[in-house]
Image (cartoon, rainbow, N blue to C red):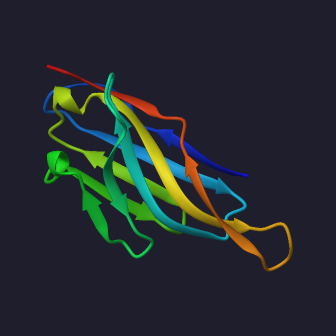
Amino acid sequence: QVQLVESGGGLVQAGGSLRLSCAASGNIFRLNAMGWYRQAPGKQRELVAGITSGGSTNYVDSVKGRFTISRDNAKNTVYLQMNSLKPEDTAVYYCNAQTVIPGAIPLAYRDLEVWGQGTLVAVSS
């Protein structure tokens, strides 16, 4: 089993900062791309930021210049530094990981997409 455990959400005033963390654990052969998604009430889940195993990043336009995604491969952890937060950033933030795990037979592997449980980020005006 593979688990993603998130932390760092909370309530902050507009203009403030928060740092989200997401640690992957379990029987992981390889951890590929990781990312942060968010879902606001009444809206669809959207990709906020993604990072490949090599460190290439991408962001949704609305957070460019304010959010930074990074990862520590030695710790199987991805971070999201969120600065200059706005009320419209309020949402439940979910960590996502594309992993490769051992298969049912020796030397066999399979892809597994994993989601965290979500952490609430609330920004007051």
Identify the residue at image location x=69%, y=66%.
Answer: 101
| Residue 27 sits in quarter | bottom right
In x, y percent, where is residue 88?
19, 29
Give the mark count: 0
In the rendered image, the residue lying farthest to the bottom is 107
Q: In this view, does 105 lie above or below 122?
A: below
Question: How far from the left and from the top, in percent, is residue 18?
Answer: 29, 38
Q: Which of 115 and 121 is in front in this view?
A: 115
The image quadrant where one finds the C terminus is top left
124 lies above or below 3: above
Q: In which quarter of the image is residue 91?
A: top left
- Residue 100, x across and y down, in percent: 63, 67
**115 left or right of 67?**
right
What residue do we see at 13% from left, 33% from top?
15
Residue shown at 23%/38% (left/top)? 17
Residue furthest toward the right? 105
Q: Nearer the viewer, residue 50 or 12?
A: 50
Q: Nearer the viewer, residue 85 or 45?
A: 45
From the top left corner, tell me how far across and down residue 93 is, in percent.
39, 37
Q: Does residue 84 appear left or right of residue 93 in this picture?
A: left
Which residue lies at the image location 39% right of the left edge and 48% below the top edge?
Answer: 36
